[in-house]
Image (cartoon, rainbow, N blue to C red):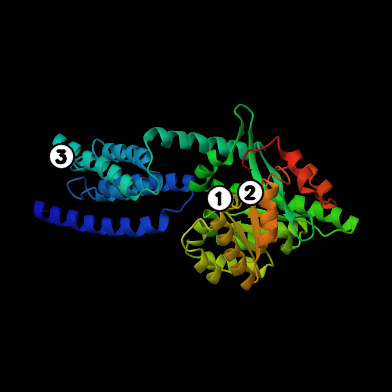
């Protein structure tokens, strides 16, 4: 076999490897972290075996190594891409001679050049293709936080609190919104904004969502029994879904199973989604499946995006939740009141209810009542409460002036 023949084989192998890499990357970037790491290791081993079995680096150019390198860069970013590139450099160099039959070592310059390409392509791809670009220190911090979240899930460090939702027309609480809290044994209470971002990047968000759904539906079922015993309407419970939840084909079935487990009527579960969630392909199908179960759907933080009106037309929502940034300006800003009136008129024409979140003063409540909000929530009525305190609210009516004094001591974000 001539060197020209070897060159042709190397070229054909390179084109085939490039095509395989392209197709595999498109199908695999959404896999769980541990599965992805396993595929990277398997890809490195398979690449080494292919080149070794072909007769060495001179018989088959090691283009196959680019597949696990590109996958590592796309799935994890620059740190894992660097480790994968170094591993490929070692496997394609000292571990694979120029010709395996004779054990002839590769030219050092050629080997180092190839290794530099492995590392360079991995880093370039990480910065161009990775979904989030972070410095190495932040990447290491995210990996550490991911480990802590997994530990917290298995050691019951997460808990739920519930912020009541108030009906203006009936002057009573009608439901609650479930909010997650992390009680770390060393670092104390960790706010959701410090760990939910990392959870969103991994499959951990699914475990957190499942935890919240199970705990919230179990509690809502218990409160329903309390309400029925008192002859009162039962509370609903609102749970937030993330963008990653929309990628789960089994989402509707999972929620149906939770409802059946706790014997909770589907209409007492409200699912809240932000506009960023609605941009994902397949969201419409997921929402229609959830509506078939009888679940109430809310669009959260309405008015903060650019395509809200189109979402109302495309998706089967029941409730519009007006963002707190607009509610905060209801008192001093007349234009905010006009905008809120327009949103309420729109929701009424679409037979949707409206919720004003972030009500903190009696002036805001009076304006919300005047312009026609159906439901409100905020510190004027109650801070987020532990589940043990919710049954007492089932039969209660609320004087907003007294509620404001009660909750004045806790002004933190829910």
Distance (Cα) linking label 3 and label 1: 60 Å
Q: Nearer the viewer, residue 75 or 321?
A: 321
Q: Dots 2 and 1: beta carbons under 8 Å?
A: yes
Give SS at disc 3.
helix
Disc number lying in front (3 or 1): 1
Which of the image's four quarters has the N terminus?
bottom left
Q: Residue at x 52, y 67 (%)?
A: 309
The vertical placement of 222 against 140, above or below, is: below
Q: Is residue 302 something one can see in this rendering?
A: no
Q: Residues within 10 Å of mark 1 (few under 14, many from 20)?
A: some
Residue occupying the point 79% across, 56% down: 171
Label 2 CA crowd tier, 10 Å (few <14, some 14–19, many 20+): many
Task: Determine which residue is flagged by label 1.
Answer: 325
Q: Alpha-carbon distance for marks 2 and 1?
A: 8 Å
Residue 342's x, y, as percent?
Answer: 57, 65
What's the residue at 27%, 56% (across, down)? 18
Label 2 to label 3: alpha-carbon separation: 64 Å
Quarter of the C terminus within the rendering = top right
First along the sequence among labels 2 and 3 = 3
Q: Secondary structure at mark 2?
A: loop
Provide the residue designation for mark 3: 110
Q: Position of residue 50 (x, y in %)?
A: 29, 50
Which residue position is annotated with label 2? 358
Does dot 1 land on a helix, a strand or a loop? helix
Which of 400 and 227 lies nearest the eye of the viewer?
400
């Amino acid at each position: 076999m001539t060197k020209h023949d070897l060159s042709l084989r190397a070229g054909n192998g390179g084109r085939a490897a490039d095509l395989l890499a392209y197709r595999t990357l498109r199908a695999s970037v959404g896999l769980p972290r541990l599965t992805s790491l396993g595929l990277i290791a398997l890809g490195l081993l398979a690449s080494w075996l292919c080149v070794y079995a072909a007769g060495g680096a001179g018989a088959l150019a090691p283009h196959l190594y680019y597949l696990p390198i590109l996958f590592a860069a796309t799935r994890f970013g620059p740190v894992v891409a660097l480790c994968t590139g170094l591993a490929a450099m070692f496997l394609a160099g000292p571990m694979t001679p120029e010709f395996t039959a004779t054990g002839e070592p590769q030219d050092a310059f050629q080997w180092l050049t190839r290794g530099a390409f492995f590392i360079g392509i991995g880093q370039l791809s990480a910065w161009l293709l990775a979904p989030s670009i972070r410095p190495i220190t932040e990447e290491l911090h995210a990996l550490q936080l991911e480990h802590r979240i997994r530990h917290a899930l298995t050691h019951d460090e997460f808990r739920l609190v519930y912020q009541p939702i108030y009906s203006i027309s009936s002057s009573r609480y009608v439901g609650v919104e479930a909010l997650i809290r992390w009680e770390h044994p060393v670092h104390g209470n960790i706010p959701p904004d410090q760990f939910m971002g990392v959870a969103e990047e991994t499959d951990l968000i699914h475990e957190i969502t499942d935890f919240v759904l199970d705990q919230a539906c179990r509690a809502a079922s218990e409160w329903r029994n309390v309400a029925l015993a008192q002859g009162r309407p039962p509370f609903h419970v609102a749970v937030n879904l993330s963008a990653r939840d929309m990628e789960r084909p089994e989402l509707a079935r999972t929620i149906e199973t939770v409802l059946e487990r706790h014997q909770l009527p589907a209409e007492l579960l409200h699912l809240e989604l932000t506009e960023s969630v609605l941009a994902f392909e397949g969201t419409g199908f997921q929402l229609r499946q959830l509506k078939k179960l009888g679940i109430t759907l809310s669009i959260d933080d309405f008015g903060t995006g650019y395509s809200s009106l189109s979402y109302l037309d495309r998706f089967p929502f029941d409730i519009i939740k007006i963002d707190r940034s607009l509610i905060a300006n209801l008192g001093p800003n007349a234009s905010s009141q006009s905008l809120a009136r327009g949103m309420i008129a729109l929701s009424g024409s679409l037979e949707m209810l409206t919720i004003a979140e972030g009500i903190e003063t009696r002036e805001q409540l009076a304006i919300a009542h005047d312009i026609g909000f159906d439901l409100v929530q905020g510190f004027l009525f109650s801070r987020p409460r532990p589940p043990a305190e919710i049954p007492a609210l089932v039969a209660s009516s609320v004087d907003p002036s007294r509620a404001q004094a009660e909750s004045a001591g806790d002004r933190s974000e829910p």
